[in-house]
Every structure is written in structure tokens, then in C-alpha cells.
Image (tube, rainbow, N blue to C red):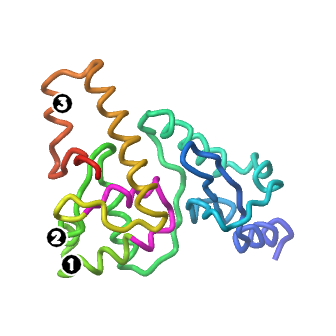
Amino acid sequence: MSEVRRQKKEVRSKKMRGYYRSPIGILSIISDGHSLTELRFVKAQEGVDLQEMAGLQDLPVFQETRRWLDLYFSGKKPEFTPPLKPKGTPFQQKVWRELLTIPYGETTTYGTIARRIGCRSAQAIGQAVHNNPIAIIIPCHRVIGSDGALTGYASGLEIKRQLLLQETDAVNSFLMGTTSPQAQSAHQMNGESPLPPLR
């Protein structure tokens, strides 16, 4: 094996970590060197390596992820997706691909996802959603209960509520700005629901 191929293999086998300071908490960014494998909120009891916080800025996938997050938290809908490589079972991967189809600023239910992918168990969908390793970009926060309740979220319901409010505010600002009534109606199509009142 050539030295270049050996080095590339070593990069793929390592977890590279960086951090992103969002308005609602610090996010841990993990990559295999090429794709984003994990994105999650750091819990209060976890320590943050300040050197990692400042380092690895030159890793392309980290730059792309931070650019995506900058747009998102500034109230804009990112028009691109960093390369994603979440690890999970074939069923989990199927659910996570479905999550990527939920439009920005809208929500769906566990039952709706179950029907779309031909699964009889909304509970199984809930478990796959809960195990999503890439928060926000794979938008598991947009999945709510059939009664409109926020239900569970790996990073806590307050984070989920703030993410939905972030998108609600952005969508409302857009709709009140330049969008025609026809575009407002189109925004509510595709079998999804506008964001519900949060409680």
C-alpha cells in the first residue's frame, strides 16, 4: 500500500472533532475526514476542548458545516447540504432519508413518516428519529406527535422548541416580506403542516 493511500485510510478511520457555538448551545461536529458523521448539542456536564474549539478550521467538511449553520441561525434556509454519512441500520437510514424531505419551516408526524416508508409502527419510527446522529441538518426536530405535541428530542424539548421557533420566525419574516398569497399557499403543500403553536 502506498504512503498516500495509507494516510487516506488513517484519516477515514479517525474521528475528527470540532465545535460550533450556536445561539442556543455548543454543537459538537464529528467527521471521518470527508463527511459529517455526527452533529449534536453538547450537554452541560460535558467538557469542551478549547483547542478543538479553535482548531480544524481547514477541514473542508467542517467549513461547509459551519457555513450551513451560520446561514441557518441567521434565519436563512441553506440551499446546500454538507456531505453526510450517518452510521445506522438500513431501517434507520431509510427513516433519516425521509427526514431530509421535510421542508424548512414545516412539521410532520411519526405516523406520517411510517405511512410514507411502509412501516406499521410509529414507535419504531420514533426510535429511529431519536437515534439520528446528525441534528438540525437531518431535521428530526420537525417531527411532532399526532396531537401537535413536541414529544421527545435527544437534546431536550427546550432545544427542539427553539429550533422550531427559529424556523417559524424566519418563515414568517419571509412571508410578510415578499411572498405572494399564491406562494404562501404553496408553502403549505406537499402533505406537511405549517409549524403548530408551541407549548
Q: Earlier in the sequence, mark 3 or mark 1?
A: 1
Kindly report the distance in space between the C-alpha atoms of the residues bearing marks 2 and 3.
Answer: 26 Å
Q: Disc number at residue 119?
A: 1
- Looking at the picture, how far across and down is residue 171, in whole percent? 31, 34
Q: Determine contact: label 3, label 1, CB under 8 Å.
A: no
The kind of residue tagged 3 is Gln
Q: Earlier in the sequence, mark 2 or mark 3?
A: 2
Q: Is residue 69 left or right of residue 44?
A: left
* Label 3: element kind: helix
Residue tagged by mark 3? Answer: 184
Magenta residues span 130-144
Q: Is residue 67 above or below residue 85?
A: above
Residue tagged by mark 2? Answer: 115
Q: How many marks?
A: 3
The kind of residue tagged 2 is Arg
Q: Determine contact: label 2, label 1, CB under 8 Å.
A: yes
Badge 3: few (under 14), some or many (20 or more) residues near its Cα, within 10 Å?
A: some
Q: Determine contact: label 2, label 3, CB under 8 Å.
A: no
Give the residue at x 33% y 55%.
142
- Looking at the picture, how far across and down is residue 140, in whole percent? 38, 61
